[in-house]
Amino acid sequence: SKGAGGSADGIKIGVTGPLTGPTANSGIALKQGMEIAVEEWNEKGGIEIDGEKTKVKMFYEDNQGKPAQGVSAAEKLFNNENVDFLIGDAFSSSVTMAVMDLASQYEKPILSGEAVSGAISEKVEKDPDKYKYYWKGNFSSDAYGKTVYETIKSLIDSGEFKPKDKTIAFVIEDTDYGRSNVASAEELFKKDGWKVVAFETVEVGYTDFYPQLTKMKSVKPDVLVSCFTAVSSGVALAKQFNETKMTALHYGIYYPLRPEFAEEAQGAADGLLWTPLFFDPELRENQKDLAAKVKEKYNVDATGDHASGYDVMKLALSSIENAKSLDANKIVEELSKIKIDALLGTYAFEQKNHTVRAGEGFISVPTAQIQNGKNAIVWPESIATSKYQPQSWVK
Amino acid sequence: MNNESVLQVNTVSKRFGGLQALKDVKFDLAPNEILGLIGPNGAGKTTLFNVIAGVFKPDSGSILYQNKDVTKFRPDKRCKIGIARTFQITKPFNNMNLVDNVSVGAYFGKQHTSISSARKRAEEILDFVGMGDLLDVEAKNLSIGNRKKLELARALATEPEVLLLDEVIGGLTPTEGNEVVEIIKKIKQSGVSIIMIEHVMKAVMGVSDRMIVLNYGQILAEGTPKEIAENPQVIEAYLGGVKHA
Amino acid sequence: MLEIRGIDVYYGEVQVIHDLSFTVKEGEMIALLGSNGAGKSTTLKTISGLLRPKKGEIYLDGQRLDQISPSSIISHGIAHVPEGRRLFPQMTVEENLMLGAFEKKIWNGRKKRVEHIYELFPRLLERKGQLAGTLSGGEQQMVAIGRALMSKPRILMLDEPSLGLAPNIVEFIFGLIQKLNKEEGMTILLVEQNANAALEISDYSYVLETGKIVLDGKAKELKDNVYVKQAYLGI
Amino acid sequence: MEIVMQQIVNGIIVGSMYALMASGLSLIWGTMKMLNLAHGEFYMLGGYFMFFLNVGAGLNPIVAGILSIIGVFIVAIIVETIVIRFLIDKPGWEVNQLIATFGISILLQNLALKFWGERFQNIPYYVKTEVSFLNVNLSAQRLLILVVAILVIVLFWAFLKYSRFGNALRATSQDRDAATINGINTRVIYMLTFGISTLLATVAAIMLAPIYSVNPWMGAAPLLKALAVVVLGGLGSLVGAIVGGILLGLLEAFGILIFSSEWQNVIAFSVLILVLWIRPSGLFGAKEW
Amino acid sequence: MNLEKNTSISTKREYVNKQNSVGLNKDRLIYLVCMLVLAVIPLFMGNYTLHILILSLIFAILALSWNLVVGYSGIFSFGHHAFFGIGAYVSAILSMKAGVSPWLGLIIAGVIAAIAGAFIGLPVLRLKAAPYIAILTLGFAEIVNLLISNLVDLTRGELGLSGIPQFTSIGPLAFNLANRINVYYLALIILALTIFVTTRLIKGPRGLALKSIRESQEAAESLGVNLTRNKLYVFTFSSFIAGVTGALFAHYVQVLTPSSVIGIDIMMEILVITVIGGLGTILGPVVGSFIVILGLEYLRFLGDYRLIIYGVVLVLVIMFMPDGIMKRIFPKAKI
Ligand SMILES: Nc1ncnc2c1ncn2[C@@H]1O[C@H](COP(=O)(O)OP(=O)(O)OP(=O)(O)O)[C@@H](O)[C@H]1O
Ligand SMILES: Nc1ncnc2c1ncn2[C@@H]1O[C@H](COP(=O)(O)OP(=O)(O)OP(=O)(O)O)[C@@H](O)[C@H]1O
Ligand SMILES: CC(C)C[C@H](N)C(=O)O
Ligand SMILES: [Mg+2]
Ligand SMILES: [Mg+2]
């Protein structure tokens, strides 16, 4: 190697994410999105570091979605690969919580990807010094709750939905994702005088909802909110919901964003309200390009994970570009100031907790509805592509 | 009652579902006596041992050992106070060598103070039963006959007052059987009282001071070997036509 | 008829049978004697294919037996009543007996055959519906022998049939064995600890010690052999 | 009242599937003294085979089902021949079988993941009508589950009790050497036993796939349930597996009704522990094959 | 009773003495070499390797404690991860919510895990067949797992605990991530202690009792061995070690989620480690742990073939080395 600078063998970005285990598909998609971003950058000649155009090199380590494995992977990247910047964890909150603690030790920037858990932001907020080098590349889970609550409120306000006794039920997956998203929604609904009549937590991948639905039929909630990361649960619930002739307004979190959901649930999903719709090249012009590239390069249909990976890599590389240096302090300085448009919206950080901002003007968390097998944005009005169509089963 | 006896079986009954395995069985064992227990297959002999050794609680009746009621004692406790038994279906500690097998009895039976003294004792006993050259052999490699001797050695190692022998001679050649009979006689000489279940008439009849015949869970006859051998009921139910003793 | 030629048998690394040879002639009753652990049961298990010899051969009527699948030995007319009876305890007496005729060729004739067994052991007819595991020791021994007879064997191998049985039952069983040999002409290979009785009823006898034959001869002659008297008869 | 009826139906339907899975586990325990940790993966394979044949190749469900059963059976026999047979007579079998079947389970799971992807797959209902009785509505598909489960279990039982092969299988399970000397080829019996146990799992997978879904991890939960069922009912007991399965199904359904989903397994396992405390060999402890 | 005749034991005394000799016999030498190697290795390693080595040590201790129950006593517990998890959560929560020092937490975690062990040991005592015990204990672990995920107020459920305090410094010795070599030595000391205590236990009368129970409960009981006391003892003792190990893990990794400490995969890992190393040996679990954890780590380059290969390797190892590596290398040694 020549010279002393780390830039001699390029800018090294380490990534930890799942490549095996139940969340492998997301991890793989994230990786592909990142690869495309890195490629684009390198095609432009790389990034100028200390006055010299330098190529970017990515190192992606599998962690099976497990915290301890995540730490091993991150350690490996810092020690053996000597990475200048870590995207960790690219996917999961629990791994992020373990990996973020390495930031102060290695004094290298760490940016997490899709992890949403509010607990991460809280950690940073409590000890900003310790997490000087850690930044959370996604908004916090309470944004989902807000979207769910406000969507339903607006439906009521406009008279499109008339709850009888303001009762709500939750069926969620027992993961940090499920729990934290619903926690914020629950709070908002309760504050508004709603009553929670059922709260069912099931294990990941659960598919037999008949007992839960039978039970719910007797308490007759006005609204049912469901949240799973395992699509199989979502499909099963949607179908069984139909079959048991439930009459509640049904709102789903996360699972409908997987492309296979609508396909597999078929008719049963038509009318479902859901969030977060981030990625839909048919609705969003700026995402078409990525979709095409993914198709061409990997021969798969692009998903939100591809976009997410692309965006977080863009965030990382932009901050390095702005810093014009691999100095960690300079990079995090630039991260804190960043404001860039990317595929999913505009990224900027909340300073008090190093968390990406959600809402209008930043990353928006819209409500979508499946209408005739296709997605339409129905809330907020400012970006809506279609009007809410009353769910056929709601009585 | 009889203060002379070391063990009293007091009208013990035991039932397995619909089967009355023991019914009002009652007898005493005198100190330093060998009591032969015979009877047809399934008569309840082994069950009786299990009751005396504490594996089964009797449905009614009690067991008195040295005039103390031990009916509620667990098997390990009974062993510690001096009641030892062998198993008809041998239960060797398969993956342990013979010394360790016997040391378990030596150490836990009458608490030896150290493992090494228990081992020493175990070797003496193995020698005594004629397996002194097999100390290091794992028990799983023994043939049936040697397993029976191992049962005997382990029980002996606990230094019992009362020894319950369940068919230790059956399965041995007559010559080997004779050797074991000699050993049993020696054990008796050292002051132990013995109840011995056996189908080999030559052996039990030769060594027993007194015999009891169990049939369908009840005592059919009791007496000296000679009386038993001539008892027509016993001949009918158990001995058959061949001459014995 | 049955010829064992120089077999070596091992359990794992341990050699139990050393270069063992002997023959069994048609219609004979052979007693195999030996002290504990001499390898008698092992010999029978090797003949019936449960164990394979490392060396040597076994022939039946000139046909090699030690290389065929153990489950087809019985179809060559050799039945084994193993040590400890080895019934199927959770099956009824009749089911146990029927399995003795498992072999395809005779499976269909099993109902008739079982009648014959009930004639030999009227006791079993009374108990045909009872689970074998709940029988008394003597009855179990009857089932074991009955099961072996279901296949109409030409050679019957019995491993300590008297073990743990009441004297009157032993008498019955020995009587039966004699009857099978004398009246039905069945060849019998009998392993017994009860050497007196075994020598009493058999024609010829082999004495086994640590896996080798140390002595053989006419049963009557062996009975008077000084060594046998000392080592096995306990006189 | 209606809700209670409905919940009973829910419980019995899943329970019947637990019973099928558990019967398979119990069967191999009975004959081979083996707890097959890869049982769930054979269930998974059953699901995928059905998916490819029914949805992929467009075969009708009955043909696809039969072919799936044959397919899984063949895979099972291969596994038995290569791995299980090699281990079964050796010392340490008690523990080693667990590692071996765990290895097989990881292998099959990750092969499925590698070749068929993480994407879960769905199979349309085989029958689309709905039925209702006693105020209980349910799709014919779910009723079909129950019917098939009962049919398969009855056939299975009759097969064990009356067929020549069934007798041989029971005999082998009780005393292998004794079976051998009676002319039973126990190697073949082991192979077929293993195959049949996976057959039962495949039937469960085929029936459940349209309602749940097919993915590489689908076997884990049913395996855990089936394990609980076999000990609840009593290992080696067919009646135990059936009663245990239905009982667990009902327990879960009513657990959800009375408490909530998150306590479902807590309740199920607490009952299991309690039952074993009172009856250490399960409800139908002794073998009843 | 007096058996003065027939006792010609002069030649056999040797055997007794061998067992109790205090000198540096071969077994001791092997232990010593192992410990020395383990003590020196980290001096040459970077943080990443150290991290993996620490995890290997932690799993070695855990596997060792499980081996005591299964390998030496024949009680087929399949819920050992419960005690690991209990230990981890107890110490983490105590230090986070009540400010209890992690050092004290280590002990308390052990004690609470031991109590849990004794509690579940009671029904286990009544069971004889291995599968019943396996599934009962597995069920227990599942209950603990669900309790931890459902008692959200205390444990934050699946959200997990993070920011668990590290071990506080002892003088100049800090135990944070930057000084993890000290954590390594801490784990090594706990491992050495565990090995020491277990060997003492196994070579002594308790070991004899446990082995006899493993081989035949009825016979052991008939020879004066108290089944209840011995089984409860070993169950409790090994749960204690598992609990301590859990606490060690918690304060090292500083993040806990129910699935990361009480998932069934932890139990499978324990099982694989122990069996590959050698069930019923002392050093087997240690060697097994290093092989399995390092192996899995260094197989990363295989990408998504990693687990496929892991599965194949497991099957092959068990087929061709069924009694583990230790017995393969040292067939005679009692280690
Ligand atoms: N644990 C048990 N459960 C049910 N029945 C039992 C049990 N133990 C023994 N029996 C039954 O009790 C009866 C007496 O059995 P036991 O073993 O005492 O007979 P035995 O006199 O020792 O016979 P043998 O001389 O054949 O050994 C038998 O019918 C037996 O089947
Ligand atoms: N399964 C086995 N594993 C290892 N060794 C065995 C096994 N079975 C028997 N042996 C050994 O093989 C030798 C011969 O045993 P075998 O059972 O053939 O003797 P036997 O003559 O039938 O004796 P017995 O009269 O006691 O039944 C014995 O030394 C025994 O220890
Ligand atoms: C399903 C995913 C969106 C989960 C999420 N990335 C998290 O763990 O926070
Ligand atoms: Mg008896
Ligand atoms: Mg024999």
Image: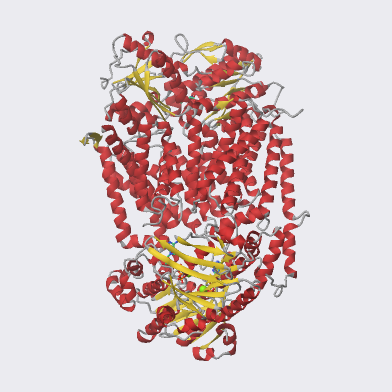
- Residue at 27%, 73% in the rendered image: C112
**Viewer-side residue, E235 vs A100:** E235
**Viewer-side residue, A114 vs A57:** A114
**Viewer-side residue, A172 vs A69:** A172
Where residue E252 appears, as percent x and y from the top left, is: 64, 31
**Viewer-side residue, B229 vs D208:** B229
Where residue C124 appears, as percent x and y from the top left, is: 33, 72
Res D123 quadrant in image: top left
User: Considering only vertical position in the picture, is B198 above or below D226?
Assistant: below
**Residue D202 appears left or right of A49:** left
User: Considering only vertical position in the picture, is A136 above or below B154?
Assistant: above
- Residue at 65%, 37% in the rendered image: E53
**Residue B75 appears left or right of A165:** right
User: Considering only vertical position in the picture, is D48 above or below A181?
Assistant: below
**On the rendered image, what quadrant is the C terminus of chain A found in?**
top left
Can see residue C88?
A: no
Res E213 quadrant in image: bottom right
How many dots with numbers?
A: 0
**Residue A352 appears left or right of D43:** right
Where residue E10 appears, as percent x and y from the top left, is: 75, 70
Where residue D73 appears, as percent x and y from the top left, is: 37, 51
**On the rendered image, what quadrant is the N terminus of chain A found in?**
top right
Can see residue D254?
A: yes
Name the residue furthest front.
Answer: B1
The colour mode here is: secondary structure
Name the residue furthest right.
Answer: E23
